[in-house]
Image (cartoon, helix red, strand yellow):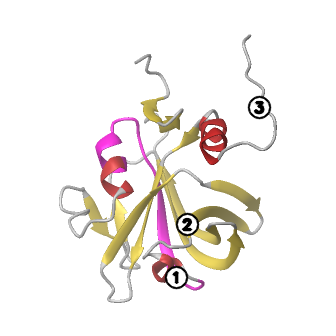
């Protein structure tokens, strides 16, 4: 096995490449902005926290225009994308007023945009926000969930999107 050990200090790019070695699932988090219009963002920083109470965490850049949409008390849906939803992941990675134009979604009972055909989704409410360097760490309590046990997840590894069973 070939390994490149870096000595301190390391560059931001070296740190980014090190983080990219860890594969993560890809999620899109949707909510409502202050005008109650649908918003969404692609996130790979989704982690479980607790089963009792059911808590998750995810991170949002401090400078994101969506910080108020996901502040304490705000509701959101975390969608675990399937391996055929690469285009959706890329679309929500960029802020655009037309993000929802080509997306299959419905408004759920809470009025939140629920994207169709995902591996899983979690309806949550933000219960705490903590500073974390250049990001905010959002802790949310899960109130509802659903999953598709057949679909495979979309993964992000070494700055590339791929499916769990793909070889490309």
- Which portion, as a residue range, is magenta? 72-89
Pick the residue in front: 142 or 88.
Answer: 88
Q: Total label count?
A: 3
Label 3 crowding class (10 Å Cα cut-off): few <14, some 14-19, many 20+?
few
Where is residue 73 shown, x and y percent of the image? 57, 85
Residue at figure coordinates x 32%, y 54% from the top left: 116
Is residue 150 visible from the viewing direction of this image?
Answer: no
Where is residue 8 shown, x and y percent of the image? 81, 41
Pick the residue in front: 145 or 46.
Answer: 46
Instruction: Give the number of the mark in front: 1 or 2.
Output: 2
Q: Name the residue under label 3.
A: 6
Residue 86 numbered mark, or none: none
Does 146 lie within the magenta span? no
Of the numbered discs 1 and 3, the one sitting upstream in the chain is 3
Q: Name the residue under label 2.
A: 60
Residue at far right of view:
8
Q: In this view, does 105 lie to the left or right of 152?
A: left
Q: How far apart are marks 1 and 3 (CA)?
A: 41 Å
Label 2 crowding class (10 Å Cα cut-off): few <14, some 14-19, many 20+?
many
Instruction: Give the number of the mark in front: 3 or 2.
Output: 3
Is residue 13 placed above or below 164 in the rendered structure? below
Question: Please, what secondary structure does the residue beneath circle 1 have?
Answer: loop
Q: In which quarter of the image is residue 119?
A: top left
Q: Is residue 58 left or right of residue 94?
A: right
Circles 3 and 2: CB atoms closer than 8 Å = no
Q: How far apart are marks 3 and 2 (CA)?
A: 28 Å
Of the numbered discs 1 and 2, the one sitting upstream in the chain is 2
Q: Name the residue under label 1.
A: 74
Where is residue 112 shown, x and y percent of the image? 38, 74
């Amino acid at each position: 096995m070939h390994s490149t050990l870096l000595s301190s200090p390391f560059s931001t790019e070296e740190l980014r490449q090190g983080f990219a070695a860890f594969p993560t699932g890809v999620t899109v988090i949707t909510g409502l902005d202050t005008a109650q219009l649908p918003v969404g963002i692609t996130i790979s920083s989704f982690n479980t926290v607790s089963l009792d109470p059911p808590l998750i965490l995810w991170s949002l850049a401090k400078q994101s225009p969506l910080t108020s949409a996901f502040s304490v008390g705000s509701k959101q849906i975390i969608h675990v994308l399937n391996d055929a939803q690469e285009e959706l992941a890329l679309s929500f990675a960029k802020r655009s007023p037309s993000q929802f134009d080509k997306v299959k979604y419905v408004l759920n009972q809470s009025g939140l945009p629920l994207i169709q055909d995902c591996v899983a989704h979690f309806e949550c409410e933000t219960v705490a926000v903590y500073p974390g360097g250049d990001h905010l760490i959002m802790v949310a309590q899960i109130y509802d969930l659903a999953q598709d046990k057949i679909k495979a997840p979309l993964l992000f590894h070494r700055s590339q999107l791929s499916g769990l069973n793909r070889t490309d």
